[in-house]
Image: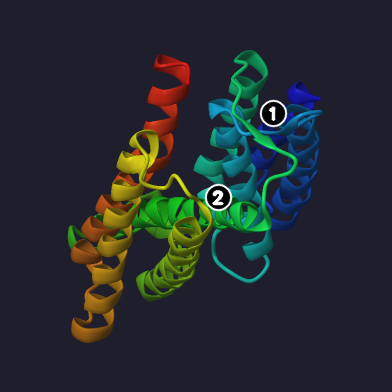
Amino acid sequence: MNTFAIILYIAAIVSRHKYLLLVLGGLAATLHALVLYQGLITPTGLNLGFFNAASLIAWVIVVLLLLSLPHQPVKNLAIVLFPLAALAIGLQGYFQTERIFSSETEIGVTLHILASILAYSLLSISALQALFLALQDYQLHHKHPGWVMQRLPPLQVMEKLFFQMITVGFGLLSLSLISGLVFLDDLFAQHLAHKTVLSTMAWCIFAILLWGHWRYGWRGKTAIRWNLTGFAALMLAYFGSKLVLELILHR
């Protein structure tokens, strides 16, 4: 099943027609969901070990992309996101890591986990969008229309989609932090303190970016720098802490 999902992701990338990409990507995401079910669901609870969590986030990102595809100009993002999803499946199948959340986990904690995953997924897409915007802006200003300029929508459309993703992702990140503060007793315990600090730092960076865009019309290079800085802090908060705790300290 893992292999078929990976093959379908690769086939979707090479397909030129948007609806063929949607069909193949949908089939790949369906098989990916079955792979996740086998790895995540255990008799003792939900296994969100490092590679399982990475695969889950990759799957959520793909699903969000597929849902947006009929209405938004996001086809070219699949060129990067689908290979990452295929890689995540391969790593999940090869490496076994455990981080069990009991089946008796409170609804508030479940809400925190769900909001965190959705926020990270959307802000990951916005970070990739920022990289495409940077390349598109560079080619536009240097009058060098490469494949990016030829295949991407106009810059204004890309920027509008970019800020829409950040706004929704910021809202979900806010929900994640609030639910964590309310429902997690050990939010500031030693093993979670750095994660909390980095997540709060990322929230502040995205808040400043959205305020600057609303108040001063920030866009272009300024918006891209703030976005990538916020995403870097968020990536360190989530995957940095999981990497150290699970793969190095084995906790």
Q: Residues within 10 Å of mark 1 (few under 14, many from 20)?
A: many
Asked if residue 145 can be seen in this view, the reply is no
Q: Is residue 95 above or below residue 56?
A: above
Which structural element holds mark 2?
Answer: helix
Q: Where does label 2 land, which residue?
A: 117
Residue 233's disc is none
Q: Position of residue 195 (x, y in %)?
A: 36, 42
Residue type, numbered disc 2: Ile
Q: Position of residue 43 (x, y in %)?
A: 81, 28
Q: Where does label 1 land, which residue?
A: 6
Query: Can you tell which of label 1 and label 2 is closer to the viewer?
Result: 2
Which structural element holds mark 1?
Answer: helix
Corner quadrant of residue 114: bottom right
- Identify the residue at the far bottom of this view: 215
Residue type, numbered disc 1: Ile
Q: Position of residue 245 (x, y in %)?
A: 42, 24
Q: Residues within 10 Å of mark 2 (few under 14, many from 20)?
A: many
Asked if residue 72 can be seen in this view, the reply is yes
Q: Is residue 246 above or below residue 105?
A: above
At a point 22% along the width and 76% down the height, the residue shown is 212
- Identify the residue at the far front of this view: 185
Q: Position of residue 210 (x, y in %)?
A: 30, 74
Q: CA distance from mark 1 to mark 2?
A: 22 Å
